[in-house]
Amino acid sequence: MAALIWNHLQRRIYSPVFILVIALAGFLTFAETMTKSRSQVSSLYFAHAHNDYEHPNPLMDALENGFHSVEADIHLVDGQLLVAHDLEETSPDRTLENLYLKPLSEIIARNDGWVHNSGKPFWLMIDIKSDGSRTFAALQALLEQYASILTDYSSLKKTETGVAGRGPVSVVISGNRDFQSIESCSPMLAGIDCRISDIFSNGTPVNPSWSGHPSRVWVSDNWKNYFNWDGTGTISPDERENLSQIVQLAHNHGLLIRFWNTPDTPAVWKLLQETGVDLVNTDRLQDLNRFFVGQ
């Protein structure tokens, strides 16, 4: 009798339907766990992944650490927009579309229209390394294929509480920037990353209306052009005051501000946050996450 029962159980346990049910239950449990882990990620609205493509999992590592901004350098090669810092490092399979635009579109489609569950916009900063005019023409054609997820800067409206009309992803162009080409596009799917010297001279605007164009959204510059502090000890009072003034000038003109080539240390991250720098540049994704989330 016991043998008959065991044979009956074996047939039920190893039947195709039973195996399928068990496998499906396991998959759903895994999917639920992954969804919960993503939703529990602390959003770091100010965190910018410098040269994001150099991490083991471009874009995904930044998202898993709560970053709301990533940076991709591009080269126009045989009609393709390839992601790499230097031309000799490019590879045909590492395109801007494959590494960033397509994954972002898929994430947004299954995440209620946003990259993060916070419902906050996400920045994709694209640093053009090849010819500015020709590269941007190819980039604009690609961006138009993803227009449904991108901010159209020509349609933004300022409100009492900020800016209305942003898409889930806002593209910003740095590097070789062809201002005229970028700003004459319709739709205008990319903003511009300005330099401090583009806008200010001795603390006053070079052209008062210059920074008011809807495409001019960021101002970024080399930390070492303005500061000597290397992140050890304490920044001098004069340099801290200079930093605060630069930040205030940018904010007065409606621009977010970022510095590259900063010492990549917790002391510098903390200072940038305290002085109102909008985007904290780092190559150390997990370390920055642990530092701010653990505070």
Image: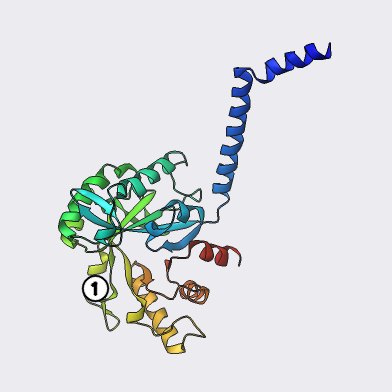
User: Is 235 drawn above or below residue 154 in the view shown?
Assistant: below
For the N terminus, give its image quadrant: top right
Q: Secondary structure at mark 1?
A: helix
Q: Where in the figure is residue 214, as x and y percent of width and height?
A: 27, 59
What is the count of numbered marks? 1
Q: Is residue 75 left or right of residue 133?
A: right
What colour scheme does the image use?
rainbow
Q: Where in the figure is residue 99, as x and y percent of width and height?
A: 36, 49
> Looking at the image, which residue sits at the far front?
3
Regarding residue 70, the answer to whether it shows in the image is no
For the C terminus, give its image quadrant: bottom right
Say which amino acid is labelled 1.
Asp
User: Is 5 drawn above or below residue 38 in the view shown?
Assistant: above
Residue matched to label 1: 198
In front of the other: 186 or 7: 7
Q: Is residue 167 left or right of residue 177?
A: right
Q: Is residue 276 left or right of residue 256?
A: right
Q: Quadrant of residue 76?
A: bottom left
Q: Quadrant of residue 229?
A: bottom left
Q: Where in the figure is residue 48, as x and y percent of width and height?
A: 42, 62
Regarding residue 170, the answer to whether it shows in the image is yes
Q: Is residue 68 left or right of residue 140?
A: right
User: Residue at coordinates 30% horizontally, 58% vertically from top-left?
Assistant: 84
User: Residue at coordinates 48% horizontally, 62% vertically from top-left?
Assistant: 285
Task: Give the class, few, some or many, for how many residues have Cα within 10 Å of label 1's Cα (few <14, many ≥20).
Answer: few
In front of the other: 8 or 225: 8
Q: Where in the figure is residue 228, as x and y percent of width and height?
A: 39, 85
Q: Quadrant of residue 131?
A: bottom left
User: Residue at coordinates 27% horizontally, 52% vertically from top-left?
Assistant: 82
> Looking at the image, which residue sits at the far right?
1
